[in-house]
Image (cartoon, coloured by chain):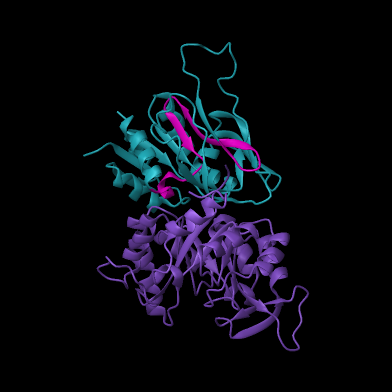
Chain colours: A cyan, B purple
């Protein structure tokens, strides 16, 4: 069997698509909110669609935020998708209301400033050197559907940061301004787009993530 | 480069089968929506839309199964419209694997449905379909376009542009603007109507109705459409998704 992956089932996200897309690239996938299973898996996927506040409340209801924190502390891989990425930041602001996130990354998720919002469709991405997730995929487009995003990424920018840690690798995209399309930060990876809906390119990205699990 | 203009084939599904003729040379079964969706995905479709034209509730249950089987095999976004009347209908389709749900008639009767869906699932799941035509006879609307129901057979007197604007304000994440005048003519999208709606809404706008040549898709994108939807030209093999994208690319538009 392939790597054992848990897709966290906390009531938000197109979980079925995520499960199928991961199975397609060889993962042994379980859809559950069970904390022990989520803790024990080789990889944990945190999906999410809809409102930041609702997703965060759903995560807390199954104590998913604790599982994420414990996994990352133990260097165990986690992949956030869409709002499942946004909740990794300090906070999200939707309709003027601020909701605290998990806070793994500094920054606030805010509304996109573009003539047409939501940003819905296939956009190119600007991939940093050394990316594992986007290995072989730098020229591909991915499927986005969102109205909010992190528009700065400051972790690792401090040159006095402990040098033995590799700084996060940040992939950018543009919709009325630059925003964070993906982050690879040690065991924590995340994409604002939907790899499970991004055709063959999305499958390759998931395969790249799986191949790095151990 | 920015977000690509999406090309979206649409399939009419009744009782689990595609009902308008579909003409792909190498298909085992031209009436199977799952197989056809996979075929369009392989051709480069950026999304696939199913329109459920079922008359009976038993057929609607069948549609859920079609959506489930499609989501197992197709890894681009799937929109399902037709007969959606409540947030529970939306929930069932999303759980089966739809990414977006199209709402039409039920929202005309009860616009609050738009807000209810957006609040429960987020705006991004909700495509509001507007079947619109130029007003005729003694009917007038500010924009000169009115919303219709029953496949364009009944006018409502509701201004189509104002309705699109109101729906976006209520929480629709996307407007699918279908010209009932152009539909089936293959003489091009209603560009004037597209421009009128584009001026007033800031959510993505999908052009539908009238596609006949690759150039028609280019014109629609230039009139402000973020996506272009067509049914018969793709089904009958008059055009492929690839030909449409080649024409858009040659015109300097971003495509996937």
In percent of width and height, residue B240 lies at 42, 62
**Residue for point 36% across, 43% down:** A203
**Residue for point 50% across, 20% down:** A167
Q: Is residue A141 above or below residue B159?
A: above
In percent of width and height, residue A56 lies at 54, 43
Task: Report if residue B205 is visible in the image.
Answer: no
In percent of width and height, residue B34 lies at 33, 64
Classify residue B36 as left or right of residue B155: left
State the residue in front, B207 or B93. B207
Q: Is residue B17 above or below residue A207?
A: below
State the residue in front, B182 or A143. B182
Quadrant of res B117: bottom right
State the residue in front, B234 or A166. B234
Looking at the rendering, the stretch of residues picked out in magenta corresponds to A173-199
Task: Report if residue B5 is visible in the image.
Answer: yes
**Residue for point 32% across, 56% down:** B73
Classify residue A108 as left or right of residue B162: left
Q: Quadrant of the image for the N terminus of chain B?
A: top right
| Residue A97 falls within the magenta-colored stretch | no
| Residue A176 falls within the magenta-colored stretch | yes
**Residue for point 43% across, 65% down:** B239
Q: Is residue A63 above or below residue A77?
A: below
In the rendered image, the residue lying farthest to the right is B142
In the rendered image, the residue lying farthest to the bottom is B137
In percent of width and height, residue B127 lies at 56, 63
């Amino acid at each position: 069997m392939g790597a054992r992956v848990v897709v966290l089932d906390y009531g938000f996200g197109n979980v079925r698509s995520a499960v199928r897309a991961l199975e397609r690239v060889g993962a042994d996938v379980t859809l559950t909110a069970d904390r022990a299973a989520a803790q024990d898996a080789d990889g944990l996927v945190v999906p999410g669609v809809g409102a930041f506040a609702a997703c965060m409340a759903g995560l807390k209801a199954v104590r998913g935020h604790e599982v994420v924190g414990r996994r990352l502390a133990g260097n165990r891989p986690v992949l956030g998708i869409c709002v499942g990425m946004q909740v990794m930041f300090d906070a999200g602001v939707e309709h003027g209301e601020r909701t605290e996130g998990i806070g793994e990354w500094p920054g606030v998720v805010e509304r996109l400033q573009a003539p047409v919002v939501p940003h819905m469709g296939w956009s190119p991405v600007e991939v940093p050197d050394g990316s594992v997730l986007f290995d072989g995929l730098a020229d591909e487009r991915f499927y986005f559907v969102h109205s909010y995003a992190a528009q700065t990424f400051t972790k690792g920018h401090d040159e006095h940061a402990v040098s033995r840690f590799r700084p996060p690798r940040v992939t950018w995209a543009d919709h009325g301004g630059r925003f964070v399309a993906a982050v690879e930060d040690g065991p924590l990876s995340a994409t604002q787009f939907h790899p499970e809906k991004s055709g063959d390119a999305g499958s390759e990205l998931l395969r790249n993530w799986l191949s790095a699990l151990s | 480069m920015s977000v690509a203009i999406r090309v979206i084939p649409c399939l009419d599904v009744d009782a689990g089968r595609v009902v308008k003729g579909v003409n792909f040379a190498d298909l085992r079964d031209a009436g199977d929506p799952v197989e056809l969706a996979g075929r369009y995905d392989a051709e480069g479709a950026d999304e696939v839309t199913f329109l459920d034209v079922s008359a009976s509730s038993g057929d609607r249950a069948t549609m859920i199964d079609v959506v489930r089987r499609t989501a197992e095999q197709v890894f681009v976004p799937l929109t399902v419209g037709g007969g959606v009347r409540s947030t529970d209908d939306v929930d069932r389709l999303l759980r089966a694997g739809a990414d977006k749900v199209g709402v039409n008639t039920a929202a005309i009767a009860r616009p609050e449905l738009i807000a209810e869906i957006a609040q429960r699932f987020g705006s991004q799941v909700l495509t509001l379909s507007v079947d619109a035509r130029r007003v005729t006879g003694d009917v007038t609307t500010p924009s000169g376009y009115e919303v219709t129901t029953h496949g364009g057979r009944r006018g409502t007197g509701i201004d189509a542009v104002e309705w699109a604007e109101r729906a976006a304000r209520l929480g629709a994440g996307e407007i699918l603007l279908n010209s009932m005048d152009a539909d089936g003519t293959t003489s091009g999208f209603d560009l004037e109507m597209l421009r009128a709606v584009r001026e007033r809404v800031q959510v993505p706008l999908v052009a539908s109705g009238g596609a006949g040549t690759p150039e028609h898709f280019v014109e629609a994108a230039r009139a402000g459409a973020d996506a272009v939807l067509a049914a018969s030209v793709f089904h009958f093999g008059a055009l492929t998704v690839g030909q449409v994208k080649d024409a858009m690319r040659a015109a300097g538009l971003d495509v996937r």
